[in-house]
Image (cartoon, coloured by chain):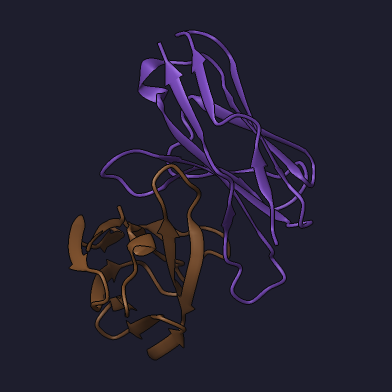
Amino acid sequence: DVKVTQSSRYLVKRTGEKVFLECVQDMDHENMFWYRQDPGLGLRLIYFSYDVKMKEKGDIPEGYSVSREKKERFSLILESASTNQTSMYLCASSDRSRVIRAQHFGDGTRLSIL
Amino acid sequence: GQNIDQPTEMTATEGAIVQINCTYQTSGFNGLFWYQQHAGEAPTFLSYNVLDGLEEKGRFSSFLSRSKGYSYLLLKELQMKDSASYLCAVRGRDSNYQLIWGAGTKLIIKP
């Protein structure tokens, strides 16, 4: 089974802090994604990466950056946290070589910015 | 613009059948996904349709009509554990990676 692990289930930070969210997958997937999930809205893509050191902006990249130095790890960085970044953050990975390329998700990090 | 619509919430009875609809308007089409998400948990992949017709997988089936921009997820013999949100997502023609997500349908199963 694919395992996508996010470093924290719950996180509380203060406005202005730099916040790091880590995600690791164990299936050698090329593609990795960061989403945020808010009530009443669909999953919104922040950034994705299709290879080591490669990144593409999603729909809502403002205020975020990412890092992918190793294939298995994809980090999301909130440069200067703000209260409107309070949300559930989900990491996902998918296998580029498969036809379906279903995304497999981690359990999420519920981030609160005070 | 690109849009996916699904009902916000549905209620059904244990043992019954429920159909969750999804309509989409996207720039191109390259597959439709259904995911299940229990409260506080990760979304898990249920089904994938890229051609018109019905795909059956145990108690769950998913149907696609590309000409109508329409899909549904059919759940039979409902169990209490089926209480969850069901997410519809579409991959557009021009993307190998990105999915466009609906807001999800919260399904409540009553005894």
Q: Is residue A4 left or right of residue B111?
A: right
At x 20%, y 69%, the residue is B13
| Location of residue B79 (image quadrant) | bottom left
Q: Position of residue A32 (x, y in %)?
A: 64, 49
Q: Is residue A48 above or below residue B16?
A: above
Depth check: give the residue in front, B96 or A17.
A17
- Which chain, by letter, is brown? B
Quadrant including the C terminus of chain A: top left
| Location of residue B86 (image quadrant) | bottom left
At x 22%, y 63%, the residue is B111
- Which chain, by letter, is purple? A
User: Which residue in the rendered view is the most extreme toward the bottom?
Assistant: B53
Q: Is residue B7 left or right of residue A4?
A: left
Depth check: give the residue in front, A86 or B16.
B16
Q: Is residue B59 left or right of residue B96?
A: left
At x 72%, y 70%, the residue is A97
Determine if residue A91 is in view. yes
Q: Position of residue A33 (x, y in %)?
A: 58, 47
Quadrant including the N terminus of chain A: bottom right
Determine if residue B51 is in view. no
